[in-house]
Amino acid sequence: MLVRMSTSVSSANSILDLIYLATAWADMAQNDGTAPATSLDIALHTAAPASSAQTSNEATYTPYARIPVLRNLTGWDAAAAAANANAALIQFAECTVGADTITHVSVGNNDIIIFYGTLAAPRAVSAGIQPQFAAGALVTTIT
């Protein structure tokens, strides 16, 4: 018999806070005590990532670079209702050369995607365009 199980809101909040805020999950998990990641990398993609790597279908306009966001309350809101969001503006470099159509975004560490999602609408990036996510616009949910 196959049973598909969901996560409780409490557990989802604990998982999100562990990943985004480096907050221990009592009696279950703790942040790496030796050399923990201090930030998570936000990447833009031109199609759904085809693998677990953030380099998969990653934007290529010049001078695009991933944006590191601190794993604390400066970078992220505390989880509530099985969701969290960026606490501040996430702003990428303005395009000076090349063009991309951004369709997806990912959150990762060491080039490994932790979460990714599809933009509500594709975003054309060309000279003079600076992609960004307003505070509260990059939301992660666990169900």
Image (cartoon, grey):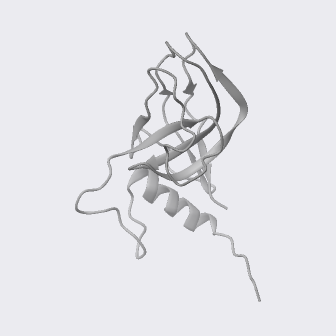
Q: In which quarter of the view is residue 138 placed?
A: top right
Q: Residue at x 50, y 62 (%)?
A: 15
Q: Residue 96 versus residue 92: which sits nearer the camera?
A: 96
Q: In which quarter of the view is residue 68 placed?
A: top left
Looking at this rendering, what residue extends furthest in the right direction?
1
Q: Residue at x 63, y 58 (%)?
A: 142
Q: Is residue 11 above or below residue 126?
A: below
Q: Residue at x 43, y 42 (%)?
A: 41
Where residue 97 appears, as percent x and y from the top left, is 50, 14
Where residue 80 appears, as percent x and y from the top left, is 58, 53
Q: Residue at x 38, y 64 (%)?
A: 24
Quadrant including the N terminus = bottom right
Where residue 28 appears, as percent x and y from the top left, is 43, 74
Q: Is residue 111 above or below residue 4?
A: above
Total count of labels: 0
Quadrant including the C terminus = bottom right
